Amino acid sequence: MKELLKNVLYAGIGAAFLTKEKIEELKGDLIEKGKLSQEEGRQFVDDLCRKSEKAKDQLDLWISKQVEDRVNQLNLATKDEVAELQRKIEELQVAINRGKGE
């Protein structure tokens, strides 16, 4: 029953967005209602915090990948490519200015 409760909470709450304070609050509610002992509550909090951090990391990676994919699909210039073009423009300006001076 406790395992089922944990799994339902993980899925229903969205573990990726839980803060430590919210997890502690949830633990307190479950202990108060007799659903978990103190030790089970501590383990629950530790487990949920680990899963929350892991989910956040996975979400960050997924978002980064999605953004990178979209930028590539749009064929946008990267920061390095823009910097390289700026360098070439400056070189051309110097060359043009030299040509005017001769």
Image (cartoon, grey):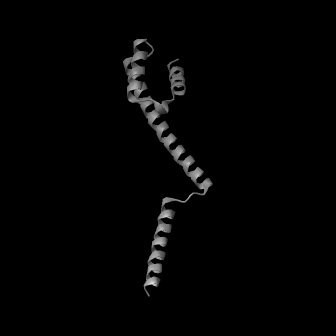
* Quadrant in which the C terminus is drawn: bottom left
> Residue 101 location, x and y as percent?
42, 84
Relative depth, front residue between 95 and 59 = 95
Query: Relative to residue 64, is residue 95 depicted above or below?
Result: below
> Residue 22 location, x and y as percent?
41, 25
> Residue 95 location, x and y as percent?
46, 80
Q: Is residue 22 visible?
A: yes
Relative depth, front residue between 93 and 37 = 93
Relative depth, front residue between 63 and 76 = 76
Say which residue appears at 46% left-offset and 33% top-offset.
52
- Identity of the residue furthest to the bottom in this view: 102
Say which residue appears at 49% left-offset and 37% top-offset.
55
Q: Is residue 43 visible?
A: no
- Identity of the residue furthest to the top in this view: 33
Tell me where residue 75 sits by quadrant.
Answer: bottom right
Say which residue appears at 53% left-offset and 44% top-offset.
63
How many numbered callouts?
0
> Residue 99 location, x and y as percent?
47, 84
Tell me where residue 35 sits by quadrant.
Answer: top left
Say which residue appears at 38% left-offset and 26% top-offset.
21
Tell me where residue 30 sits by quadrant.
Answer: top left
